[in-house]
Image (cartoon, grey):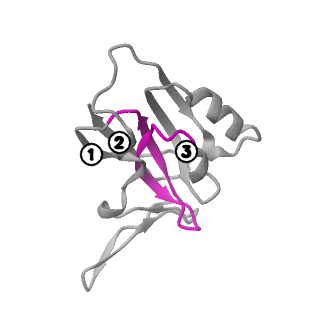
Amino acid sequence: MGTNTSVQTDNTLIRTSNSLGQEIPNSDEVLTHLGNINATSDCLPQTLKILVWNIYKGRKQLFETEFKELTANCHLILLQEMALNKELLPIYECHPNLQWEHAANFFLRNEVRTGVATGTSAKPLSVDYRVTADLEPFIKLPKTIVITKY
């Protein structure tokens, strides 16, 4: 289960992948913005309602109902294993006052971005990411961290 290395050919970077077919995004493919930036405020309130959740790529049966209930009235939401597929995107965008900054850890075989995200009711001052040097023990891919400043 070793990781292949990236190869540069004719200015095209070929993604690195593991034996499970999961591919590491190139640097220009990591960050994705979702939601309505115009509907958010300029700053977070002094008293915050925060949710931190590993959503397991939205695979649980009651995910949509639980997501809508748990994220309602939150100012800051930190998600792990957030998959960006056509079934889940409308769920993430169910609260028009939230915007999302997503950092892809890898692509599933069907090009679905999966990673970590920050959802918030305020516009970030900046968004960045970091990729760890160490690999996950099972999937042999690095972890990705999204960094949002408010």
* Residue sitting nearer the eye, 134 or 28: 28
Q: Name the residue that disc number 1 marks.
A: 128
Q: Name the residue that disc number 3 marks.
A: 92
Number of disc labels: 3
Question: Residue reaching furthest top?
Answer: 47
Q: Are marks 2 and 1 in contact (CB under 8 Å)?
A: yes
Closer mark to the observer between disc 1 and disc 3: 3
| The N terminus - image quarter | bottom right
Percent position of residue 23, x then y:
47, 64
Q: Are marks 1 and 3 in contact (CB under 8 Å)?
A: no
Percent position of residue 32, x then y:
39, 54
- Give the residue at x 68% y 32%: 66
Looking at the rendered structure, the kind of residue marked 2 is Val
| The C terminus - image quarter | top left
* Left or right for 79, reference 148: right
- Give the residue at x 27% y 45%: 128
Looking at the rendered structure, the kind of residue marked 1 is Asp
Question: Residue reaching furthest front?
Answer: 39
User: Residue 1 in magenta?
Assistant: no
Task: Give the magenta part as a residue range.
Answer: 93-122
The answer to whether residue 62 is above or below residue 27 is above
Q: Name the residue that disc number 2 marks.
A: 146
* Left or right for 99, reference 70: left
- Give the residue at x 27% y 44%: 127
Between marks 1 and 3, how big is the CA–CA gap? 20 Å
The answer to whether residue 33 is above or below residue 46 is below
Question: Residue reaching furthest bottom?
Answer: 10
Looking at the rendered structure, the kind of residue marked 3 is Tyr
Residue 69, image quadrant: top right
Label 2 residue SS: strand
Label 1 residue SS: strand
